[in-house]
Amino acid sequence: MVIGTWNLQNLSRPGAGPGTPKDEAAYEAKLDGLASTVNRLDPVLLGVQEVLDPKALDDLVERLDGHWHVLLSEHPDRAPHHPIRVGFLSRRPMKRLADATAFPKRLLPVQSGDGGGTIHAMGRGVLAVEIEPAAGHRLTAAVCHLKSKLLKFPDAQHPGRDRFDTDDEGERARVGAYAIFRRGAEAAAVRALADKLLGGQGDTRDVAVLGDFNDGPKAATTQILYGPPGSQLDHPRGAARPDPGDAMRLWNLAPLIKENAFSRVFEGEKELIDHILVSHSVLARVKKVFTGAGEPLESTGEQPKAGKQPSDHAPVLAELAY
């Protein structure tokens, strides 16, 4: 069976603002492109991000082959003009286990802007579900979408709106720091949920954490999600050598991608910012890990906009033996 993650890039019906389809023709083309890719890759479980309009997701599901179950987080982004959320599409019935936003209890609220305001929860919920991939087996999966690296600056001339650039380099540095603060705190929140899902039994309990982490495999925020250090697939010691951290560790499957090991092209640079992490028991089931864009990705930039392709991300998938 195949599991995966895909950022659907502002999935919404036409006219919902920047980065969304401008008209019905563009919307139909986006749905056709998304559906064609999902049908071709045929995942059993797909974590999705940037669902701006749940009705648009319903429109997409209607175009998919076979029967699908859908669960969405009840915690969209707090930005009123851009309430994106995560969710799951599944060929199997799903049980909702958690839909979390709060930072861990000992983590204090983090600064979110020059005004001194703070946030104490993730911008959008992380959703955890359980499915039965085969008789007698359980797979627990969580999908998340961490804070973007895209920097937004307050627009003094238009209160409540943002700019995507600044001539004040001090402001650029501060806003960049605020983004890292938030993404790090969100990673800690997802890791706290992963700890609960693993329950110290990752060597026998099948758990996957996947989504748009908005950073690469070596980034500090991404590594927070791994748990105990060492033993990653590209670590000199490797993953085959048992150690006490196996029961709580999550392994990033990124090193197993043999071709097109990127999920976005940002200003001409290829990036792998969408990831699948698995527990030790799932690691032994992995047969193949791959990205699934049907054609070369267009390069995206600071200003969000809808391109010719259905999404500016490629899906990342793993084939598991059950």
Image (cartoon, helix red, strand yellow):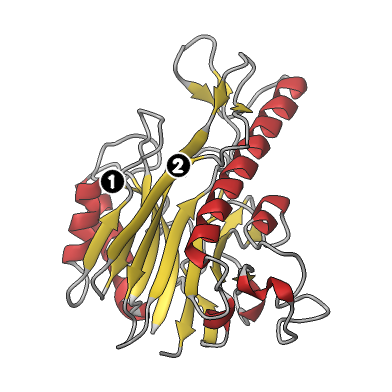
Mark yes or no: residue 197 visible: yes
As measured in the structure, the alpha-carbon distance from the residue carrying label 2 to the one carrying label 1 is: 23 Å
Q: Residue at x 40, y 37 (%)?
A: 77
Q: Amino acid at mark 1?
A: Ser
Q: Residue at x 24, y 61 (%)?
A: 70
The residue closer to the viewer here, 148 or 44, is 44
Judging from the image, what secondary structure is the residue with disc 2 in? strand
Tell me where residue 313 appears, x and y as whole percent. Answer: 49, 59
Tell me where residue 58 appears, x and y as whole percent. Answer: 19, 56
Q: Residue at x 46, y 20 (%)?
A: 161
Q: Amino acid at mark 2?
A: Thr
The residue closer to the viewer here, 237 or 179, is 237
Report the disc number at residue 30: none
Q: Is residue 308 above or below residue 301?
A: below
Tell me where residue 216 appears, x and y as whole percent. Answer: 66, 58
Report the disc number at residue 101: 2
Count of picture labels: 2
Left or right placement of residue 287 versus residue 226 in this view: left
Q: Earlier in the sequence, mark 2 or mark 1?
A: 1
Tell me where residue 102 appears, x and y as whole percent. Answer: 48, 39
Q: Is residue 214 above or below residue 1?
A: above
Q: Which residue is mark 1?
A: 12
Q: Residues within 10 Å of mark 1 (few under 14, many from 20)?
A: many
